[in-house]
Image (cartoon, rainbow, N blue to C red):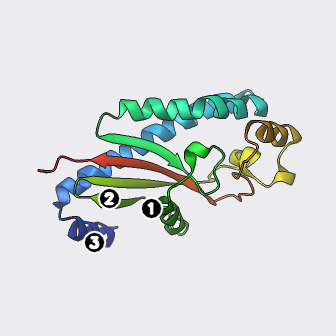
Amino acid sequence: MRKLLLSVILMTGLSAENLEEVFKIGQSGAKELLKTLGGEMKKQMASGDIKKAINFCSQEAQTLTNKVDEALGENVSIKRISTKYRSPANKPTKTEAKILFMLESTNSPLLTKVSDNEYKFYQPLRIGKPVCLNCHGKGEDMSEVARKTIHELYPQDKATNYNFGDLRGAVVVTIKRGETE
């Protein structure tokens, strides 16, 4: 981690303190989104009704992401991306797809410099709990209700056939800094 941090400091020209602050902003934003979405999903899954949980994701996950985005303020934005996205809103750009490829081999977050005053923090998302496979696993291992509901809500779905531990995508936090910092 120290080598990565030193490399980023040298590449960005930021002081270590400022770079650490940018990193913490990204980390905090990603944590808030994951806490918000995870907490709500846990509530939905507690009912044992997989269809209800899938409907929740379809109707509310992006709305909750937007609320967290708004709460982070004017100079910070947040989104979720995946190369195997369920919702087109989570489709990565070409650059983001390359970053996702790099994240395949690590659980560590990544900070990139976009411009003199813009950075992107990438928090990898892995299939970290067996319950995730109820909706993101292999088709034959998912319940018929889950398969049908996902197909109805997401006819172009790409977000299945994962194994436990696979990279599912990333939370991306874009941080804009003042030019004098």
Which label's residue is closer to the chain start, 2 or 1? 1
Horizontal relation, residue 150 to residue 123: left or right: right
Task: Estimate the spatial distance between the alpha carbons at disc 2 and disc 1, rounded to whole Å.
Answer: 19 Å
Q: Nearer the viewer, mark 2 or mark 1?
A: 2
Query: Residue 83's x, y, as percent?
Result: 60, 57
The residue beneath circle 2 is 114
Q: In the rendered image of this protein, does residue 83 appear above or below residue 49?
A: below
Label 3 SS: helix
Horizontal relation, residue 70 to residue 45: left or right: left
Residue 169 tag number: none
The residue beneath circle 1 is 108
Q: In the rendered image of this protein, does residue 40 appear above or below residue 2?
A: above
User: Which residue is the extreme one toward the left?
Assistant: 180
The residue carrying pointer 3 sits among few (fewer than 14), some (14 to 19) or many (20 or more) residues within 10 Å by Cα, namely: few
Q: How many marks?
A: 3
Of 28 and 177, the residue lying toward us: 177
Q: Examine the rendering and report whether any part of residue 48 can be seen.
A: no
Which label's residue is closer to the chain start, 3 or 2? 3
Residue at (53% x, 54% y) in the render: 92
Where residue 109 sits, quadrant-wise, is bottom left
Residue at (15% x, 50% y) in the render: 179
